[in-house]
Image (cartoon, rainbow, N blue to C red):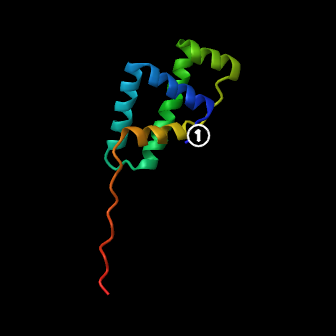
Amino acid sequence: MSLNRCEQRVFDYIQSQVDEGHFWKQKVQKICSAAGSGFYASAVRLESELWHYYVERSEVTPVFQEAARLEGLQRTSMRNLAEMLIRLWTEPKVRKQPPEQVV
């Protein structure tokens, strides 16, 4: 899966910061386990939260501050990152197979 620069920056950061990684792993699992929350609905919600996190980090973390200074803070999709984190940190849901038809 290919990540854009902003997504890659967030992923690298949460991988390098143990507490942040733990926090996001729990958040992803909680969002995905919410009643009635399918893969795509979870990805949409998570994508929004990841963007807000990016903006928040750009105020206090040097690597994000520099990126914001150079690139600005125009809304960037975090959808690929959201989907990747869901796949990495949650158990895949088993699809029910339709019963075999007897002919």
**Left or right relative to 70: residue 25:** left
Residue at the (36%, 41%) spot, across then down = 90
Residue 70 percent location from the top left of the image: 70, 19
Mark count: 1
Residue 91 percent location from the top left of the image: 33, 45
Q: Residues within 10 Å of mark 1 (few under 14, many from 20)?
A: few
Residue, disc 1: 2
**Is residue 57 depicted above or below 78 in this figure?**
above
**Left or right relative to 83: residue 18:** left
Residue at the (42%, 48%) spot, across then down = 39
Residue at the (48%, 40%) spot, across then down = 84
**Is residue 65 depicted above or below 12 in this figure?**
above
- SS at circle 1: loop
Q: Quadrant of the N terminus?
A: top right
State the residue lying farthest toward the right.
70
Residue 50 percent location from the top left of the image: 50, 31
**Is residue 3 depicted above or below 94 in this figure?**
above
**Is residue 32 depicted above or below 21 in this figure?**
below
Q: Quadrant of the C terminus?
A: bottom left
Q: Nearer the viewer, residue 16 or 41?
A: 16
Residue 99 percent location from the top left of the image: 29, 73
Q: Residue 5 lies in what quarter of the image?
A: top right
* Residue type (three-letter) at the residue carrying disc 1: Ser
Residue at the (50%, 28%) spot, across then down = 11
